[in-house]
Amino acid sequence: MADAITPRNQDYSQWYVDVVRAAGLAEYSPVRGSMIIPPNGYALWENMQRALDGMFKATGHRNAYFPLFIPQSFLAREAEHVEGFAKECAVVTHYRLKTEDGELIVDPDAKLEEPLIVRPTSETIIWDAYSRWIQSWRDLPILINQWANVVRWEMRTRLFLRTSEFLWQEGHTAHATEQEAIEEARRMLDVYTTFAEEWMAMPVTRGPKTASERFPGAVDTFTIEAMMQDGKALQAGTSHFLGQNFAKAFDCTFTNQNNEQEHVWATSWGVTTRLVGALVMTHGDDQGLILPPRLAPMQAVVVPIYRANKPDDKAAVLDTVATIRRELEVAGVRVHVDAREEQRPGWKFNEYEVQGVPLRLAVGPRDVQNGTVELARRDRDGKESVPLDTLADTVTSLLDEIQRGLFQQARDRRDSRTTKVDSYDAFKEAVEDGFVLAHWDGTPETEARIKEETKATIRCIPFDRDDEQGEDMLTGQPSEGRVLFARAY
């Protein structure tokens, strides 16, 4: 399996596709730009969902569902929003097919009175509902999340990272005051940061986007940006302060505590199945996936080893394996026993290495006699014998160690490939290999020129930047501080 994976230093893009397919995370579908997510990939997404869903509910949010189809007139109500998504919309114009001369065609008599847009995002359909649900300050805040699929018609696609249809969650909240909405947008960015760093073991840089990079219709967009192993940035999650733009577009008002009519304040925020791709590119190696234990569908796999012509050995090994499984499950470990007899142990070892299972345990007759188990870690080479009577403690301790180690490794890589520069020549060299912190004069013209000449964009204005004053590396104009540039997916 690993032989089919192109080395990273040979062709990083092909390496990524090879790993995704070899590990059974996704494959291309017959529909251009869409993907099939097999059980391995979907199990990983489910673990992400569970973790995030718990975090959302802990912050007071509830799940709901809104329609897949959105009337075209809804999108037209918010000018920036429709302009931002117009080129990506899939449009339904008819509701029936018919057979004519043996050929299946669209029935011209079944044209819809108004075209329907296949959901690219749900602000408009949700704010239409909120305009009915909200009458008084007592109805606020509304804190709702939706798990759904969306369609954004992409011309250039790549599994997980950019597809025409993808899975995501989208939060949509309504508030009585501007300050409450801003705090909500920042709170949810904090949730995404915690998830990325503590669950995905993926360090991120946080901050607002520039005006040209904001979500269409937003007043402010806050982002978390991660560095992939090739030095490119990946936008891993965004949270938007929408002001009153959508409330005004859908005439969503409420009576405040002073008995005055006021428009509602709004946020929206979301992450997508792109996070699966981020996980691959943050931790994978030339053998395949390396999964952080907190998200791995299988945290440990146990492979029994015996000869089929020695039934006593087989019985002893399988009995020991059953005991190991029970003890690990009691300890809260997601464990899988691979007792398939049609595959050799070496083939299984390779399969789980490609799939990124954090720990592999092998048990043979000699291990049973010695009261040990052979243990191998996915994040490093080598194997060791571990006493069976302390195995559960050893496994849980190692899973925590692997989780911490993957985060530290990714953070060290990011920090070592983040460079401060003051000249444009130095910038053009540094951006070939990673993140760059450089002064910017704050104008969209300079931002656009740098993007055109170097293919690098301003990923965010970091929250944690210092108050260092300086001069724009391109124009020499005053700068209020450094911003984060990178080439990006």
Image (cartoon, rainbow, N blue to C red):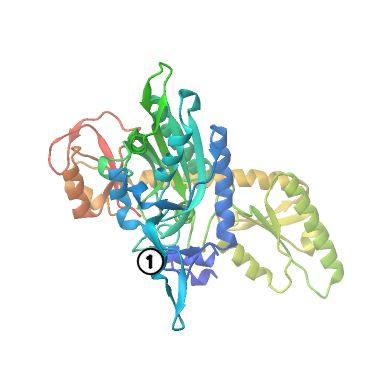
From the image, tell me which residue sits under label 1.
11
Q: Residue at x 12, y 39 (%)?
A: 476
Q: Residue at x 31, y 47 (%)?
A: 76
Q: x, y percentage for residue 70?
A: 42, 51
Q: x, y percentage for residue 318?
A: 80, 62
Amino acid type indicated by mark 1: Asp
Quarter in which the C terminus is drawn: bottom left
Where 178 sits versus 76, above or below? Answer: above
Q: Residue at x 60, y 66 (%)?
A: 351
Which picture quadrant has residue 341?
Answer: bottom right
Q: Is residue 348 left or right of residue 225?
A: right
Q: Is residue 376 left or right of residue 119?
A: right
Q: Residue furthest bottom?
A: 101
Where 186 sits versus 84, above or below? Answer: above
Q: Does dot 1 land on a helix, a strand or a loop?
A: loop
Q: Residue at x 48, y 34 (%)?
A: 133
Quarter in which the N terminus is drawn: bottom right
Q: Can the viewer see residue 273?
A: no
- Considering depth in this image, is 45 or 393 the residue closer to the camera? 45
- Considering depth in this image, is 284 or 183 the residue closer to the camera? 183
Which picture quadrant has residue 94?
Answer: bottom left
- Considering depth in this image, is 16 or 364 the residue closer to the camera? 16
